[in-house]
Image: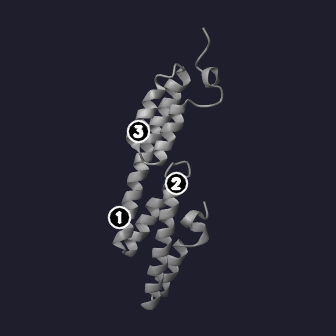
Amino acid sequence: MPNESKPGKRFGKRPPKFFDQAINHLEDSDFRDAFSAAIRLRTVGNEYWATTKYEELTQLITATRRDLNTLAQARRLLRQGSTDAVLEALELAQSIGSESPLHDESQRLLKDIGRELLTLAEAALERADSDRALELLGKNSPGSRLGGRGG
C-alpha cells in the first residue's frame, strides 16, 4: 500500500482542486463555500491533505473571518470621521498581515484612511494647530504602511 502521508504521493506538487477553490472563495469573502471546499479535502484519500492541509485551511478561514470583521470595524471608524476614530481605523487596517487573503482590501482601505488623514491635517492647519497637523501627516508618511508603502 503506497504511503499517502506526503503531499506528492497522490497529487504531485499540485494541491487538490478543493484547496484552490477554498482559497478563491476566501478571496471573495465567501466563507460558507470556502469552508465547504475545505471539508471536501477530508475526502481526497490523502492523509496529508485530509488532515494537515485541512487544518491549515480551516485556521486560515477563521483568521480571514477575523480580518474581515477588523476591516469592517475600521471602515465604521473611518466613516465617523473624528481624528481619534480615523487613527484607530488606521491601526486596525494596518493589523491585516500580508499573508491574509484580505490584504489587498486592507491596502485599499489604508489609501482611504490616508486621504482622510490629509483632510484632517488640513483642518488642523486651518485652526493654526501645526503640531496636530504634523502629527497627522507623520501617520501618512511613506514609512507608515499607508496604501502599501513601507512595511
> Viewed as shown, does residue 1 lie left or right of 125?
right
How far apart are labels 2 and 3 at the CA level? 20 Å
Badge 1 amino acid: Arg
Name the residue nearer the viewer: 30 or 92. Answer: 30
Residue at (40, 75) in percent of width and height: 83
Instruction: Name the residue beneath numbered marker 2.
Output: 103
Say if residue 149 shows up in the picture. Answer: yes
- In the displayed structure, 37 sits above or below 139; it is above
Work out how far the residue at label 1 is from the one at label 3, CA to CA, in angstroms: 26 Å
Q: Which residue is mark 1?
A: 76
Q: Is residue 72 above or below residue 13?
A: below
Disc 3 secondary structure class: helix
Residue in the picture at 47% in, 81% down: 121
Give the residue drawn at x 46%, y 69%: 113
Q: Amino acid at mark 3?
A: Asp
Residue 127 lies in quadrant: bottom left
The x and y percentages for residue 64 are 44, 46
> Which residue in the structure is indicated by mark 3?
33
